Image (spheres, grey):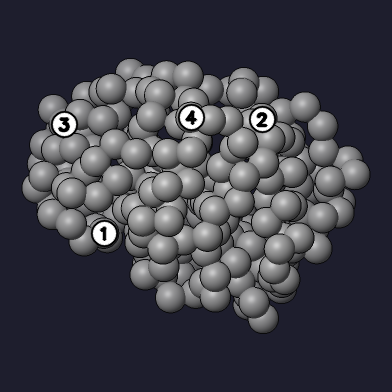
Amino acid sequence: MTTLGIIQARMGSTRLPGKVLRELGGRTVLDRVARAARESGVLDDLVVATTIEPDDDAVAAECARIGIDCYRGPVDDVLTRFLGVLETRSAEHVMRFTADCPLLDPRLVARAYRVFAAAGADYLTTSITRTLPRGLDVEVVRGAVLKEIDKMAYDHHRTHVTSYIYSHPADFDVVGMTVLPDLSYLRLTLDTEDDWRLIETIVDHFGDAPVAVRELAGWLADRPELASLNAHIAQKELEQA
C-alpha cells in the first residue's frame, strides 16, 4: 500500500495572510507541518499542493528549500489540486494536511493511519466528534474515493476536499475516530494574530521538536491565561471559503 501525504498551503489567507511562511523557532509554519507529517513514519511520499497565484511562488520556493515536491493548481478548487497531485503519482491512501497546523502531533498521525488501515475504510477523520484540539485533526482517504467524488462534489465541497464524503456517510464507509480525554476546548490552529501569540509562546517554551498532545494540554492546563488568548475566536462555517 502506498500512502501519500498532501499539504494544502497558500499565502492568501483572509484573516492572516502569509501565515504558512511565518517563522516559528527558526522554521516556517509549512516546514513544521511537513516535518511532523514525515516524522509520523506512515507516509511513502509527501507533496505540497499550492495555487498558481504569483503570491504562491514563495510557497513553491519554500518547498524547494525544504526538499518537498510542489504541485500548483486552482485557488479555491482544492479538490482539483489534490487530484492533480494524484495524476503525477499513484497512491492507494491519501493523508490530508493543512499548512496552518504547526503543532501537528506525529504520534496522532500514525495512530489515525493505523486505525484507518485496520478498518479498511474509505475515509477516517478525527473531527466528526471532535475531542482533539482544533489544529491537530487527522484525515485519511482512499485515493480512489477522492477520484470518485470529483464527479459529485460542488461549491464548498471542492474547497474542503473531503467534506462531500462525510456529508454523505450513507454512500461511503466513514470512520470517526475519537481520542480521549476530550481536549476540544483548546484551539491550536493558526488563523489569526491571537492564534499566533499562543502558538509562538508554545514553541518558545517547548523548542523545535513536535510536542505530544497530552504533554501540551497538561502544560496549558496550568496556564489558563495562555489558552484564553484565542478562546474567543469563532471557526469559519463549512460553507465559508
Residue 192 % position (x, y): 34, 23
Taking the spot 22% from the left edge, 43% from the top edge, the residue there is 24
Q: CA distance from mark 4 to mark 3?
A: 32 Å
Q: Identify the image quadrant of residue 123.
A: bottom right
> Which residue has dot 1 on it?
210
Name the amino acid, label 2.
Answer: Asp
Q: Given contact means CB atoms under 8 Å apart, are the residues at marks 3 and 1 in contact?
A: no
- Where disc 3 sits, the SS reads helix
Q: In this view of the protein, which residue sits in the foreground, 182 or 214?
A: 214
Tell me if residue 36 can be seen: no
Q: Nearer the viewer, mark 3 or mark 2?
A: 2
Residue 233 % position (x, y): 37, 20
> Which residue has dot 4 on it?
55
Taking the spot 36% from the left edge, 56% from the top edge, the residue there is 65
Determine crowd level at label 4: few under 14, some 14-19, many 20+ residues with C-alpha closer than 10 A.
Answer: few
The answer to whether 225 is drawn above or below residue 136 in the figure is above
> Which residue has dot 3 on it?
226
The answer to whether 107 is drawn above or below residue 221 in the figure is below
Q: Earlier in the sequence, mark 3 or mark 2?
A: 2
Q: Earlier in the sequence, mark 2 or mark 4?
A: 4
Q: Nearer the viewer, mark 3 or mark 1?
A: 1
Q: Given contact means CB atoms under 8 Å apart, are the residues at marks 1 and 2 in contact?
A: no
Q: CA distance from mark 3 to mark 2?
A: 33 Å
Q: Given contact means CB atoms under 8 Å apart, are the residues at marks 3 and 2 in contact?
A: no
Name the amino acid, label 1.
Answer: Pro
In the picture, measured across the screen, residue 177 lies left or right of residue 77, that is left
- Numbered circle sitting on residue 76: 2
Q: Earlier in the sequence, mark 1 or mark 2?
A: 2
Q: Nearer the viewer, mark 2 or mark 4?
A: 4
